[in-house]
Amino acid sequence: MTRFAPQSSRRTTAGLAALCLAGLVLAPSAGALRPADPADSVGPAPARAAAGPSDSTRKPTIVLVHGAFADASGWYDVIHQLHERGYPVLAPANPLRGLTGDAEYLAAFLSTIDGPIVLVGHSYGGAVITNAATGNENVEALVYVAAYALAEGENVAAANELGGGHTDLLDHIVIRPFPGAGEGDADVYVEPSAFRRIFARDLPRRQAAAMAAGQRPGAYSALVTPSGPPAWQDIPSWYLVSAEDNLIPPVAQRAMAARAGSRTFEADSSHVSMMSHPRRVTKLIVAAERRS
């Protein structure tokens, strides 16, 4: 498979000041989320540039982006394992209000992070990172975990059919309106009775039932919104296929990975491989960071 050469230089982003405009709360939120450098915890707090490790030695920030019908808690075990390896990790809330706005939100979030980034997306989160990372020179690697690595002009619904794939999702959705939705738009949920089979069949029944009850819906429009220029054209990517996935067909996952030129691996997993196989997902992220 095609491999991309790592980019030789990265710019330091100065987006934090822009987010402070008009008293927006994004800047303090981002500051609270950013893990402190080890040096910052010793003695009085010096200037940030003097306290942290040098650009040549510090680890990149791992940013984990969840998909629809889920939230950032699905990354819990992966976050723990990355922390054990010394990586700073952020797992922002994906708004799930539509691909264009979600990607703009993530792009703004990424602009508040100094230094290199490894950007990881699960499921619909893959479509979001594909758009949000475009043109961001700090993003050194993309990691797709059973995720949509869309081509320009393609939408999520069409991607499910790549390679002759078929998803069971559309046969088991619940539509509910939400205030402020555009014409024809609404929230989409997975029927609780089908949630475990489609989404998480290798998790304990009680856990899957709790996830079904607390699922975060995605906007229906996100299924049909065309994607923009894909970041994977310029940024090296890794892909973990969930071979037992009933939401994104495995054949479609393989097709997207091949098209993106991703280094591709497989796990005998349901759609939520970051929960059922967290060590495998962690190893893939670390491999992407190390370019191995």
Image: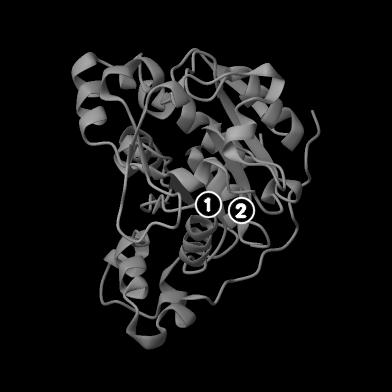
Q: Earlier in the sequence, mark 1 or mark 2?
A: 1
In this rendering, position of residue 203 left or right of residue 222: left
Q: Determine whether, in the image, residue 265 is placed left or right of residue 209.
A: right
The label nearer to you, 1 versus 2, is 1
The reply to whether discs 1 and 2 touch (Cβ–Cβ < 8 Å) is yes
Within-10-Å neighbours for mark 2: few <14, some 14–19, many 20+:
many
Query: 269 above or below 113?
Result: above
Q: Which amino acid type corresponds to the residue marked 2 in the rendered image?
A: Asn
Query: Which one is in front, 281 or 22?
Result: 22
Picture quadrant where residue 20 is located: bottom left
- What residue sits 49% from the left and 47% below the top? 221
Secondary structure of residue under mark 1:
helix
How far from the left and from the top, in percent, is residue 182? Answer: 44, 58
Amino acid type at mark 1: Leu
Residue at 45% x, 49% y: name it: 184
Q: How is the image coloured?
A: one colour
Q: Residue 168 at what x, y percent from top left?
A: 47, 19
Residue labelled with disc 2:
131
For mark 1, what is the residue? Answer: 99
Is 254 above or below relative to 289? above
Q: Residue at x 36, y 52 (%)?
A: 93
Q: Give residue 200's position: percent from left, percent from top.
A: 36, 20
Q: Position of residue 260 (x, y in %)?
A: 73, 37
- Taking 35 as reference, is 244 left or right? right
